Amino acid sequence: MNHELNKPYQANILVVDDTPANLRLLVGMLTEKGYKVRPVMDGELALTGAKAMPPDLILLDINMPKMNGYEVCQKLKEDELTREIPVIFISALDDALDKVQAFQVGGIDYVTKPFQVEEVLARVETHLAIRELQKSLTIKNHDLEVIVQQLRNTQEQLIQSEKMAALGQLVAGIAHEINTPLGAIRSSVENIADFLKENLLKFPDFFHSLTPEFQQYFLELLQRSSQQRTSLSSKEKRQLKKFLIRELETEEISNADTIADTLVDLGIYDRISPLVPLLKDENGAQILEKAYQVGSIQKSTDTIRTATEKAAKVVFALKNYARYDHSGEKVRSQITEGIETVLTLYNNQLKQGIEVTRNYESNLPSLLCYPDELNQVWTNLIHNAIQAMDYKGSLTISVTHQGDSLVVSITDSGKGIAPEVMPRIFEPFFTTKPPGEGSGLGLDIVQKIVQKHEGKILVESVPGKTTFTVNLPFNTND
């Protein structure tokens, strides 16, 4: 076994300082924390090293001979290869203008010498974490772009396929299902970056300015906020806020409305008594606001996690759906997984007003089949059901094991199929849809795929209830 593959990723950090003692200290403490560290003593070497092997982060001194840190940072940001590398300035210059210039040339943080080891490590860890989030978002965006490009490249072939024609109708909904979580991720990353830019340098001074008692209050607020993971509706928040306002007013706390609003946003709406001394103090509002700002970072990371999972689910479904097995051989597959893939792609249409009920029998055996072709069956049947209901009603999908067969029933509450139309619905090129909305091949293709699996498809319809039942036999010879 290759043990190198099991090692966690070690971030690569370039440290630039012309003072050997500082360089040794920084290299030592970063190496001890498991980072890969490359030390250099002047700006030119820093530029050369960053281009040759771009690091994950750069710690950069300002006062250096030949080329100062500002110039180094500016050149890094002008080069496409190195412009995205985060730069933290570490300098003895403590004037506000020096810090402003550091941010103007592209730095993301500023640590004043003599520095505290814990502070440097904390900032390094924070900015590496943000960098990883940005890389992850870039990779996911790239993956999505690749998928979209693949779909574009095969557009002519997709038009020939009823399955891909249905996918074409879903593109807007799929884009919405992907863009919504991506927008949430982008907004959350910006919130985190804005907070760090505006507050990180001031935060140590703020915390040390508090008395030990108020430091404890501040930490308690953060702890209680981090423990709150229940998502509240707007109505629930309003009710909790009213309750809190009454409780705060009973304690004769001013600005009860504003404080109650902040506490609810922090996820703190019970056991208020221990916090009363803080809330009554003239500095209490400032401490509460700082806790809210820090708590918002946790909320932003939770949002990123949830949104990433949602986008990944849609991308996974899209990949599964667009895949086609050219081997021509049956494989064992869980039918419900294919149905769920189709439902995921139709989520944007379903959530407009369709209630979906799943009746999946537990412990269903796998079926030897052509899963990509069966996905086309579920696509056509679900698509027809949605249109029959005009995007409002109930859709019930049942999957059961009956004797030697797997039985899938798809029932909608639409207007039903007219008796005179029923005998012709499986005929090729027959359609009741307006020109341009249907080829008339959908149910013909469905029937042929079911027959290819030696199965049967039946339909029963009355106004308000139409059921397509697909019977797929298990192949007991395999």
Image: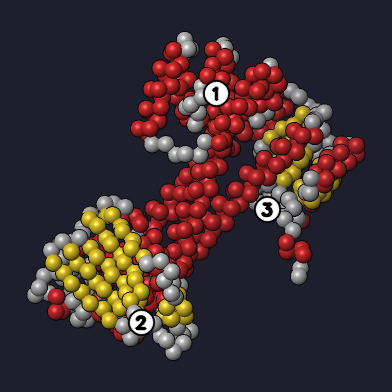
Q: Secondary structure at mark 3?
A: loop
Front residue of this view, candidates 371 and 9:
371
Residue 221 x %, y %: 58, 27
Disc 1 crowd rating (10 Å Cα; few below 14, some 14-19, many 20+) is some
Extreme residue toward the left, this view: 420
Mark 1 belongs to which amino acid? Answer: Glu
Q: Which residue is mark 3?
A: 81
Mark 2 belongs to which amino acid? Answer: Asp
In what quadrant of the picture does the N terminus appear? bottom right
Residue 11 x %, y %: 73, 50
Q: Which residue is mark 2?
A: 404
Let me know if residue 443 appears in the view.
yes
Disc 2 crowd rating (10 Å Cα; few below 14, some 14-19, many 20+) is few
Mark 3 belongs to which amino acid? Answer: Leu
Residue 185 x %, y %: 51, 46
Q: Secondary structure at mark 1?
A: helix
Kindly identify the residue that appears in the image at 76 percent across and 56 percent down: 52
User: Badges 2 and 1: C-beta atoms under 8 Å apart?
Assistant: no
Rendering quarter of residue 189:
top right
Q: Which residue is mark 1?
A: 289
| Nearer to us: label 1 or label 3 | 1
Left or right relative to 61: residue 177: left
Front residue of this view, candidates 367 and 257:
367
Q: Which of marks 1 and 2 precedes in the sequence? A: 1
Q: Which of marks 2 and 3 precedes in the sequence? A: 3
